[in-house]
């Protein structure tokens, strides 16, 4: 403990004696490119932080092993927003900008991202989001890019699939946050237009451990199918309890992760969901290589959060590389953002290329999966359009 | 340096929150766990008003007003609940308000919150970065500190502390608990709302997850670590708790566990602080101190407190008839009549459970009789609150003393003095000269009262440092300080040795000789014999006999019941 206190005191001294790096004139090449990340490293949703940071660290290791960017290594600086607390995000961004001279920040969760967006605008910091799915994120900052499909797009794709199956009467379980509610909004708007009806809408708190009341009401509404507008690991609990309550009709959702499977057990059988598609295939060597390296390093298969943040590091590196090629004081968030906008096509770890649209959201295919024996089976691509 | 500036802005914001919370829990003892609610209300009110286009400082004023009004509404359940129950009620409130904010989407934006809140700018300079905003934050914090200091160190603040120490005793020295609680909640809530408006202006974004119960507990930790009842402590507590996690960020640890480990270390440090310094970094200051300089000539004149209302000796001052008090099926007092006369000491004796203390409770408004009448010089006291009855001239002590234990001897007396302009929060700020002048006079009067009971040498001690006999004397002093004409003593002499008795008896006698109306419950029959002019013997809730001590004590039936 004494060493820790000593270290802390020293750090405090460093803090007090000057942190001038933020205001110092930028050298054209920094010693390292610091890739900041503001993730849920503690709190109720720290599982996200864990896998996202693993993806980031793996990508940085790989890039550095190949000599970094023209010999300059990348360095990860991971910060914590305590599972979505907006002001923690702001504090973290302040640290990244002022202490680390970070020009690229990988952000997650809608609340903290919305809170840091104005600062990123002012300080010209490139923001890459691979997790937050709220529709409100679109256009929040001119330097904000997403390689994650918006929740509302996933929800819409799921509804199209349900419509295709001829289902009419829907009951929905909604995550009580902006992500869940942005899907609910789309569902309320479009499901009727597709000729369907909504029998019940129930809300689930993030990190809820008991949702029996909601499940009982959903079951009592006797729908043709239940839509889970929930993100990991809540779909697991919902699947488990719905099946235990003897609900036998289709359940359709928008996410399935190893965590979800762990919570759901056998109840995941038959679950269909639309999602950002990450499955390693021989067809796309990079996806396979990533998946293998991730599994070798962490002893588990990557989910798409790990893939998104892994991919975002590569996007950042590529943006730096392109900006550097332009010369001048290239290592600035706005220059990096310009580099992305100038050529919005990037290699995707999901396979092939992805293209950032005008609104900053990368256009990716949304995949439909069906779960059998605990394994997600790719079914086909569906469109949200 | 902006990072350091950001931390300082946070320290300012949390200092305001901790100060506001300290007034509520540290000064007034109202343990309400809903401070983040007021914080949220201030942030949302400012955010929504500013987004709607109201210019500075209208959103801020609106936030403070709405915060204050909600504080008053929350004070209402707090009037009936205390301790654990208040904690539960306010915890529930915390959850309910956040759910309302979360679900009232048309107003609050629901889970998406309020975005694009305009920042502040003065004289063409936008306070958009931490170093500029810090100036505003520091000024607001300084103003809040001065305001809270004035509140906490005024007679109003002293009354808050008395209420914290013991609610019924505070009522018994004439304090209006309704007013105290409602105004404390309003002030505390308004200040927290002001912090909320700083939040909205600084972050330009307000969402509900910034105001969870964790936030309330975080602010509570600042108050406790800094020192309960100490405003400087709140500032230091805020600084420590804001800076500590930031410093811990400099500890290098593996990424996947770093932030969780930092929280653990943070928790351990807090536990260690509280283990080795439970009173917090800065303990509560002792309050008004007697510097030993002023004399009676400074305006202190306790004689008016010691002398009665000039009634002629023997005149009936208090007249109670047919008092009945039932608790469910049990009748504690049934048809009790009593008269108390000026210049006389009336003794109440009887076995335990006879109804003596219940009678006192009815006479002083702590209980309302089911039947019967109580008049003071012909004016009915029925239905009046205890503090009104004290104001009318009838005050009481308690068998279990109920002194304000963590306050000084001097403060115990000062808080009991009647008609203090500074008890009214409005006067503290609108008529500071009057309050200050009266405070000066009251200090002298309080010392006079302490001299009367010979406790002047202990004026600056806390009650905890007194001997039992001295505590009994302080009970008398406090009662005396109320200036009440009628003084009801509930076993003031029990447990005292003969030497101390010999010291106290003349004090009580002197009160009656000076024209006060004295009534005393006592089991020590020697004391009753020596002191009382009239004795009421109570049993089974009514007066079995009334007369001089000799008459009552020689009654053979009573002797069989009680004096055997």
Image (cartoon, coloured by chain):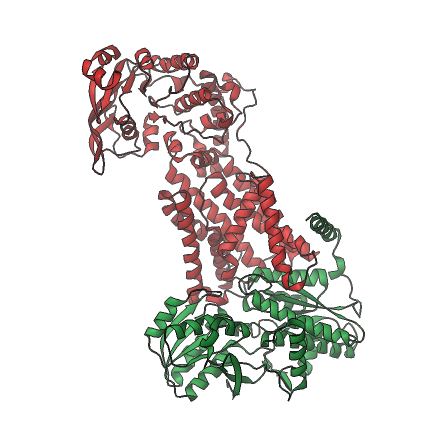
Chain colours: A green, B red
Query: Would you identify the image quadrant in which residue B174 lies?
Result: top left
**Percent x, y for residue B180?**
41, 39
Side of A376 relative to A122 (left or right) = left
Image vertical order of residue A8 relative to residue A193, above or below: above
Query: Which of the pair B92/B454 is nearer the observer?
Result: B92
Regarding residue B128, the answer to whether it shows in the image is no
Image vertical order of residue B263 relative to residue B379, above or below: below
**Percent x, y for residue A203?**
42, 69
**Percent x, y for residue A81?**
59, 62
Regarding residue A301, the answer to whether it shows in the image is yes
**Percent x, y for residue A316?**
69, 75
Query: Which of the pair B53/A342 is nearer the observer?
Result: A342
Image vertical order of residue B501 relative to residue A227, above or below: above
Image vertical order of residue B22 relative to residue B266, above or below: above
In the image, what residue occupies the spot 41% across and 57% down? Answer: B96
Query: Which of the pair A11/B259 is nearer the observer?
Result: B259
Total label count?
0
In the image, what residue occupies the spot 62% across and 57% down? Answer: B261
Side of B235 relative to A273 (left or right) = right
């Amino acid at each position: 403990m004494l060493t820790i206190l000593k270290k802390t005191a020293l750090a405090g001294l460093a803090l007090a004696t000057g942190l001038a790096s933020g205001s110092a004139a930028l050298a054209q090449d920094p010693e390292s490119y610091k890739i900041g990340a503001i993730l849920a490293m503690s709190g109720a949703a720290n599982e996200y932080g864990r896998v996202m940071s693993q993806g980031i660290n793996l990508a940085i290791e790989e890039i550095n092993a190949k000599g970094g960017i023209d010999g300059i290594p990348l360095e990860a600086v991971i910060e914590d927003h305590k599972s979505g607390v907006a002001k923690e995000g702001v504090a973290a961004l302040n640290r990244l900008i002022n202490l680390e001279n970070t020009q690229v920040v990988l952000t997650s969760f809608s609340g903290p991202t919305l809170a840091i967006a104005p600062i990123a605008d002012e300080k010209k910091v490139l923001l890459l989001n691979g997790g937050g799915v709220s529709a409100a994120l679109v256009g929040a900052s001119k330097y904000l890019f997403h390689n994650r499909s918006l929740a509302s797009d996933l929800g819409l794709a799921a509804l199209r699939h349900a419509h295709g199956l001829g289902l009419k009467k829907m009951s929905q379980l909604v995550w009580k946050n902006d992500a869940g509610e942005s899907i609910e909004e789309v569902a309320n708007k479009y499901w009727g237009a597709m000729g369907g009806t909504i029998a019940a809408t129930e809300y689930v708190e993030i990190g809820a451990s008991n949702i029996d009341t909601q499940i009982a009401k959903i079951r009592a509404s006797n729908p043709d199918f239940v839509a889970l507008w929930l993100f990991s690991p809540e779909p697991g609990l919902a699947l488990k309890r719905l099946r235990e309550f003897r609900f036998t009709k289709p359940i359709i959702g928008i996410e399935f992760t190893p965590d979800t499977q762990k919570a759901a057990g056998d109840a995941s059988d038959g679950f269909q969901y639309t999602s950002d598609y990450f499955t390693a295939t021989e067809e796309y060597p990079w996806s396979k290589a990533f998946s293998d390296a991730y599994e070798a390093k962490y002893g588990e298969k990557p989910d798409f959060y790990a893939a998104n943040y892994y991919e975002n590091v590569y996007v950042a590196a590529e943006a730096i590389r392109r900006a550097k090629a332009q010369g001048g004081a290239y290592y600035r968030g706005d220059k990096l953002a310009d580099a992305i906008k100038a050529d919005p096509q990037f290699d995707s770890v999901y396979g092939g290329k992805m293209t950032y649209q005008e609104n900053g959201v990368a256009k990716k295919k949304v995949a439909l999966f069906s779960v059998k024996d605990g394994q997600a089976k790719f079914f086909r691509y569906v469109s949200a359009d | 340096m902006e990072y350091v500036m950001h931390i300082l802005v946070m320290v300012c914001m949390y200092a305001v929150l901790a100060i506001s919370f300290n007034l509520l829990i540290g000064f007034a003892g109202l343990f309400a766990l809903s401070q983040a609610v007021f914080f949220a209300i201030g942030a949302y009110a400012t955010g929504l008003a500013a987004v709607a286009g109201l210019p500075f400082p209208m959103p801020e004023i609106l936030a403070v007003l709405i915060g204050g009004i909600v504080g008053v509404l929350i004070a209402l359940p707090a009037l009936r609940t205390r301790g654990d129950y208040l904690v539960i009620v306010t915890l529930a409130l915390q959850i309910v308000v956040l759910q309302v904010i979360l679900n009232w989407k048309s107003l609050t934006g629901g889970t998406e919150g309020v975005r694009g809140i305009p920042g502040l700018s003065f004289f063409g300079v936008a306070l958009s970065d931490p170093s500029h905003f810090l100036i505003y934050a520091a000024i607001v914090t300084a103003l809040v500190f001065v305001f809270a200091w004035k509140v906490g160190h005024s007679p109003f603040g002293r009354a808050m502390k008395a209420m914290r120490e013991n609610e019924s005793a505070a009522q018994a020295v004439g304090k209006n608990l309704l007013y105290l609680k409602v105004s404390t909640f309003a002030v505390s809530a308004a200040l927290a709302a002001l912090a909320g408006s700083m939040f909205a202006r600084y972050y330009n974004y307000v969402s509900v997850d910034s105001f969870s119960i964790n936030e309330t507990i975080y602010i509570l930790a600042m108050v406790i670590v800094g020192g309960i009842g100490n405003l400087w402590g709140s500032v230091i507590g805020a600084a420590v708790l804001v800076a500590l996690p930031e410093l811990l960020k400099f500890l290098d640890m593996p990424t996947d566990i770093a932030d969780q480990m930092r929280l653990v270390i943070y928790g351990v440090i807090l536990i260690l602080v509280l283990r080795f310094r439970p009173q917090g970094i800065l303990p509560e200051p002792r309050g008004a101190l007697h510097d030993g300089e002023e004399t009676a000539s400074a305006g202190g004149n306790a004689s008016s407190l010691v002398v009665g209302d000039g009634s002629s000796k023997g005149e009936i001052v208090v007249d109670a008839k047919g008092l009945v008090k039932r608790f469910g099926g049990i009748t504690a007092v049934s048809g009790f009549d009593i008269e108390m006369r000026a210049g006389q000491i009336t003794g109440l004796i009887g076995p335990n459970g006879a109804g003596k203390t219940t009678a006192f409770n009815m006479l002083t408004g702590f209980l309302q009789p089911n039947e019967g009448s109580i008049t003071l010089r012909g004016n009915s006291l029925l239905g009046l609150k205890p503090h009104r009855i004290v104001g009318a001239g009838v005050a009481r002590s308690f068998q279990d003393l109920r002194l304000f234990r963590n306050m000084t001897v001097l403060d115990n007396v000062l808080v009991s003095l009647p008609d203090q302009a500074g008890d009214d929060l409005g006067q503290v700020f609108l008529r500071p000269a009057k309050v200050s002048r009266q405070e000066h006079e009251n200090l002298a009067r309080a010392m006079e009262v302490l001299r009367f009971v010979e406790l002047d040498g202990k004026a600056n001690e806390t009650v905890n440092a007194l001997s039992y006999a001295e505590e009994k004397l302080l009970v008398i002093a406090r009662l005396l300080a109320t200036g009440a004409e009628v003084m009801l003593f509930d076993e003031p002499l029990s447990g005292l040795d003969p030497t101390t008795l010999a010291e106290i008896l003349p004090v009580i006698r002197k009160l009656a000789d000076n024209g006060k109306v004295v009534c005393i419950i006592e089991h020590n029959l020697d004391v009753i014999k020596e002191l009382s002019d009239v004795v009421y013997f109570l049993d089974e809730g009514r007066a079995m006999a009334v007369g001089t001590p000799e008459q009552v004590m020689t009654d053979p039936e009573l002797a069989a019941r009680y004096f055997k």
